Amino acid sequence: MLIAASVLAAAAGRVKVKEEVQALRDTRLDLCRAIVSEMHTEIYKHSLRKDGEDDIYETVPAICLAIVQNYTLSQAPAPQRSWRLTKRATKLDDDDMPDPASFAHLMTLKKVCELFTEEQQQELSELMYKETYQRDPDSIQESFCNAEKLAPAPPPRPRARTLTAEGGQNDGKEQKEKDEKKKKEKKKKEKNKGEQTQTMPSMEEMLKKYDTDGSISNLIEMERETPELMLDPDELKQVQTGAVEIRCDVCRAVSTIALRRAKKAKALRSEDALSDMVTSLCVGTPATSDEYPKYPGNPPLWGELYTVSRGAEGRWQMRRLPKGSAKEEKGGGIAGGDVYNRMVIKHSMISRACKQIVHEGEHDLAELIFSTPQQASPEELAAKYCATECPGEEVAPAKDEM
């Protein structure tokens, strides 16, 4: 139903390296089996062995296209967050109208496959050259795709050096052969790198091919701009109610953050600088930036420092997280459940409340800061700015917010 936050990062080609490494670690053996199976098919189909091993060597990284077309990478919900590789029921190219889930983690799978084939290119090439016409895929997988064979390589040992008759040093015949082999591998990798880039389709090309009516692009755009509209009706109602009920808390936070940023930038007496600063208070990435938003909806990043929950009276409230607490966006303090949905609810509440206060409120925060004495405290600024949002309440920020 929902496109995970990582889908957007994948669509933008900005999946984090840490995520790719974790996905490779979790799916290493399954990915190996998939690659062996696909290569076995390709070698038979195109008679790649007839001209020697070079064609098979160059097919190893190119096989990632078949992996993307025939397999799906998915991630389990929190707290496990583990990755799984599964065979598609239908080849991606043959889907008449693929749903948005078909693109989930697509670029992550492409990158994970590239990492694995780059690491195992020589081993896979030699294996498939020798074994394809002698054994079936299951037999090859059983012998090669196991934890012992695919364990990370140990750090290289110091070279053993021997004295020659003239008293000089010699690395030995074995070491020379290894060096020659490495040079050959490096040369082939450099040659293959450009070809592989051309072989793998970009996300834009795949969207253009499969998204014939624009529905998938619309979903991705909605996910990026207003992710709360893709929530269940009950969850969307929580966002709407919460955005109203936390306005006082958000106003106090905004007052403190705005004054702190203005002082840090030494912009207390610059109307233009204050106006620009206030405009960016409710977003994480400015609209003028080419950078992709960190979270769906582009909420203010200071929201990471807060938690939103219902209080004893059932009203929503926003409170500062204890110092040193893990961010909720990374699963900190949340046991199980759908972390992504809960964070969409939290960020949407904060974003809506912030924009209503800053852009639709009674007072202009930039003008208020400009007209306030430079020695004014966050409490004094909040007392003026949040009087409408916090009627009858003490508006002084908590000490930890200062």
Image (cartoon, grey):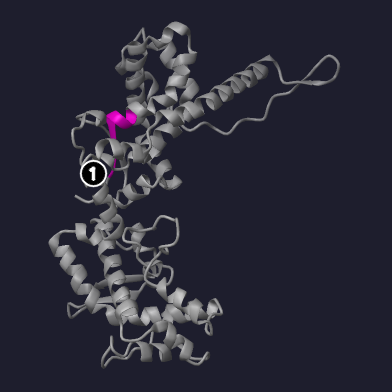
Drawn side of residue 135 relative to residue 213, left or right = right
Quadrant of the image for the C terminus? bottom left
Residue at the outermost right position: 166
User: Does dot 1 land on a helix, a strand or a loop?
Assistant: helix
Q: Is residue 204 above or below residue 334?
A: above
- The residue labelled by disc 1 is 100
Q: Position of residue 150 (x, y in %)?
A: 43, 28
Q: At x 28% / y 43%, what residue is drawn?
A: 104
Q: Is residue 49 visible?
A: yes
Q: At x 35% / y 40%, what residue is drawn?
A: 203
Q: At x 41% / y 73%, what residue is drawn?
A: 279
Q: Is residue 84 visible?
A: no
Q: Residue 162 falls in which quadrant of the image?
A: top right
Q: Position of residue 226 (x, y in %)?
A: 26, 61
Is residue 189 magenta-colored?
no
Q: Position of residue 194 (x, y in %)?
A: 50, 29
- Camera-side residue: 120 or 263? 263
Q: Residue 86 falls in which quadrant of the image?
A: top left
Is residue 74 magenta-colored?
yes
Start-end of magenta stretch: 67-75
Q: Position of residue 302 (x, y in %)?
A: 40, 70
